[in-house]
Amino acid sequence: MTTLSARTAARFAARFAHEEEIAHWDEHVTANPNGGNLLQSEAFAAVKRNFGWGVRHLVLEPVDGEEAQPSYNLVLEKSIPLLGRFWYLIKGPDVAGIDDVPAALAAIRKFVAREKLGVFAVKIEPDIIDSEAARALLAGAGLVKVPNLQPNDSTAILDISPEPRLVLKSLHSRGRNAVRRAEREGVEVVEAEPTLENYRTMHALMTGTLNAKSNTGARVRSFEYYRQFWTEFTRRGQGRLYFVYENGRPSVGAFVINYGRKGTYKDGGSLQQRTQYGDSHLVQWTAILKAKELGCVEYDFCGTPPADRLKDSSHPFHGLGLFKTSFTKTVTDFVGCWDFVIDPLRYRAWASAGERVARQLYTRRTGQQFY
């Protein structure tokens, strides 16, 4: 996570990654200044290739004499009729501080022009903590604030670097007591095999949970999307599926990803009528311990209301926020999505109607979400 800093901003040059770098992509991404993000991974790139996106591997490297780290970023690309190429720098650029973002984008602008890539705009969403100063810097650099896309632009993040006893002690009392009671009452968490049957069960739990909470406005992607997503991460040893059983069938499910130093509670679902107290909490605690074993030092619960709306019961994710902040007491808000405009005329057409039409047409044609 990056914040504002007093250091001098770095200068960058942009290029596409070499074949050798792409072959070891995850090693490079997890060595980024902020440790990368699972949405920049090789596994996620493989998924998005099958769902309407081109994939580019972009490197931002410091110019001669600079001491900054290079940054490896996944770019999702779409070709928009009459407008050109649109880039989505998902969870990037991953640079050391917000003061590096304008320089990184300036390097991308030069690269696009030099290589005649025809990109008219770049959507960014760096993991930079939100603040008035951060927003002012981005707006001052000419970026346009647009609606957020990812569920964890506001999220609960737990430091899991201490020994397990101290991590458990650090939890909110609600979460700690739920974990201990579930353990006392014999609730069992099972790491499930990554089979098609278990994936279908997990998808059904997710769909049932979302249908029961119909005020969220969210919807579950297709089973085929999740099947590919879960398969790509599990086959690389980066994803695990957990179930709790009640009366012989799975009652709580969670899919958790370990990527670099970060564990992430990516997907979850449960039966609405259950009797085992603390079952969802014990699933998370089990996943946290496994993430620690795999070298993670933080655990992202992946999505809450913004910090200033955490107690607002009308917020569609109020219940999720209560559950997730029973582990960590604070919410982290990131700056979210911003558009970097390269060609103002074409971007104006995109912003006024092009994006809306492109999203509608893609969903009508495929049944899938555009982003």
Image (tube, helix red, strand yellow):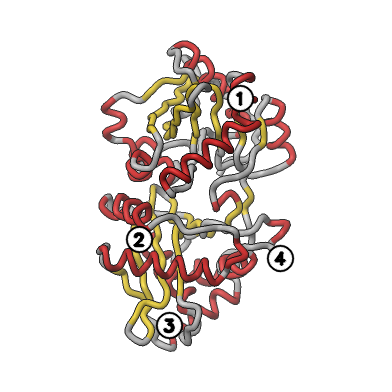
Name the spot of residue 320 as percent of width and height, x first.
58, 66
Give the label on residue 183, or none: 3
Q: Nearer the viewer, mark 3 or mark 2?
A: 3
* Residue at screen point 27% across, 50% down: 236
- Earlier along the polypeptide chain: callout 1 or callout 3? 3
> Where does label 4 land, which residue?
314
> Of the residues shown, which amino acid type is indicated by label 3?
Glu
| Element assignment for label 3 | helix
Q: Nearer the viewer, mark 1 or mark 3?
A: 1
Above or below residue 13? Residue 132 is below
Q: Is residue 35 visible?
A: no
Pick the front one: 36 or 347: 347
Name the spot of residue 109 as percent of width and height, x first.
54, 18
| Element assignment for label 4 | loop
Please say if the residues under marks 1 and 3 sit with CB atoms less than 8 Å apart: no
> Of the residues shown, which amino acid type is indicated by label 4?
Ser
- Earlier along the polypeptide chain: callout 3 or callout 2? 3
How far is disc 3 from disc 4 in space, using C-alphas?
33 Å
> Where does label 1 land, which residue?
347
- Earlier along the polypeptide chain: callout 3 or callout 4? 3
Above or below residue 118? Residue 157 is below
> Of the residues shown, which amino acid type is indicated by label 2?
Glu
* Residue at screen point 37% across, 67% down: 202
> Where does label 2 land, which residue?
293
Please say if the residues under marks 1 and 2 sit with CB atoms less than 8 Å apart: no
30 displayed left or right of 130: left
Q: Quadrant of residue 310?
A: bottom right
Q: Nearer the viewer, mark 1 or mark 2?
A: 1
* Residue at screen point 68% across, 37% down: 134
